[in-house]
Image (tube, rainbow, N blue to C red):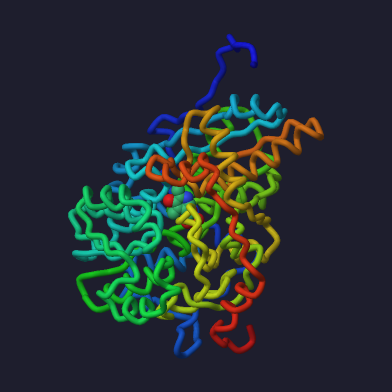
Amino acid sequence: MASINEEVRTHKYTLTEDEMPTQWYNIIPDLPAPPPPALHPGTLQPAGPEDFAPLFPMALIMQEVSQDRYIDIPGAVLDVYRQWRPSPLFRAHRLEEALGTPAKIYYKYEGVSPAGSHKPNTAVPQAYYNKLDGIKKLTTETGAGQWGTALAFACALFDMECEVFQVGASYDKKPFRRLMIEVFGATVHRSPSDLTEAGRMLGADPRNQSGSLGIAISEAVEMAVKDPDTRYALGSVLNHVLMHQTIIGEEALLQLAKAGDTPDLIVGCTGGGSNFGGLAFPFLREKMAGKINPRILAAEPASCPSLTKGVYAYDFGDTAGMTPLMKMHTLGKDFIPDPIHAGGLRYHGMAPLISHIYELGLMDAESVPQTECFKAAVLFARTEGIVPAPEPTHAIALAIREALKAKETGEETVIVTALCGHGHFDLTAYDEYLSGNMVDEQVTEARFAEALQNLPQVPGQ
Ligand SMILES: *Cc1c(COP(=O)(O)O)cnc(C)c1O
């Protein structure tokens, strides 16, 4: 048993509301090469703003292709952000002690938001820009339910309707998220549903019964394009979503400076890439400017490893093939991941912007099996007192791997990670782990290969 520590240390680095950044950061103009454009699936020509107009308001479409390095956060959005922002940056002293590592571990905690994750950082501006356009309803998909919760909250604030297609596996396992979405006033459907053509068609295949984010996106997109007063909102993947999340990294840069540390490693989990990009891009800007030199590392699940096992190719964002084609790391739109607990990481593709930055060699990726993640999460909970959502446990597991390497070398490595959500609605996953019933599914090479067979044919790619 360790002895009692009487030292009073600094655990939490905060900012005043006035110190909070008031702009989002757009990394695209700072990159050494521009990301490949999205393509119209019929003509295979670069998709123009009009191709996205049935889905998104023009303000967001313009942000998607913007060359401005900074975009002002509207007052109405900042006002909502201030309810929980700036979010705290914690130094994980007790976790470091338990590991016996000389590494310093910091985590930026987004679980303090009303939805319990980073998702409201983009849900609020997305609802705001749609409201400005006179839109009455937003549709969307959700996995574990974090994004559905965030969008339902944002729609409630701006007095809009919200309809959510939830991945079947999560709908069945996680009723409390669904109930929270309903408390915020939104409607939830189990996907695949019989409310849409895509849902009926894809739901006819028994292998699709547990659903996937790709299928739920098809349903939500179909419902939005059929009604001029309805639009669609995406919780990750797109450039504007990643940009909204940069408030995380901008705050963390200021907070880490207050702590007097320079990062050696930035590590975050990647589902579609938004919390990772949100934390990492402002640090990457400083790195490209030669001011700091951290390694930037994405943590992905071994069951759905789009960066480490996928190909870099044009693919659809959804399973029915309704979206424009995006060049991204993909496992193929037909890949149905095993129903692991990190529902937010069960997406066949990776943000085109993250994929591009990965291809440019500006970041690395590693995959982690879920039992290692939960082992790390339980240690984290028992030392730091926060029960993490299953998704960020992937980043915690990699942070721990690195901290243990630092123990070998004796280096005082500074690690910064995004604790992008709490796991209060994911306790059944912890139950499975604690009772010894959690398994690591092995995805065969044949299954990866099969899903890649149907990639759309794009000449010259
Ligand atoms: C949605 C979600 C994710 C995955 O999405 P990203 O866009 O990759 O961030 C990860 N963690 C939590 C808590 C989420 O809600």
- Number of marks present in the image shown: 0
Note whether 442 is above or below 259 in the view shown: below
Residue at the spot 57% in from the left edge and 74% down from the top edge: 36
At a point 41% along the width and 29% down the height, the residue shown is: 16
Residue 190 sits in which quadrant?
A: bottom left
Tell me if 377 is positioned left or right of 177 in this view. Answer: right
In the displayed structure, 312 sits above or below 75; it is below
Looking at the image, which residue is at 58% across and 9% down?
Answer: 6
**Residue 36 seen from this side:** yes
The answer to whether residue 70 is seen in the rendering is no
Front position in the image: 321 or 75: 321
Quadrant location of residue 448? bottom right
Q: Residue at x 21, y 66 (%)?
A: 135
Residue closest to the far top: 6
169 left or right of 37? left
Image x and y of residue 43, in percent: 47, 90
Give x and y (percent) for residue 357: 62, 62
| Quarter of the C terminus within the rendering | bottom right
Percent x, y of residue 180 = 27, 47
Location of the N terminus by quadrant is: top right
Position of residue 321 measured from the top left corner of the image (x, y, whole percent): 43, 80
Q: Quadrant of residue 379?
A: top right
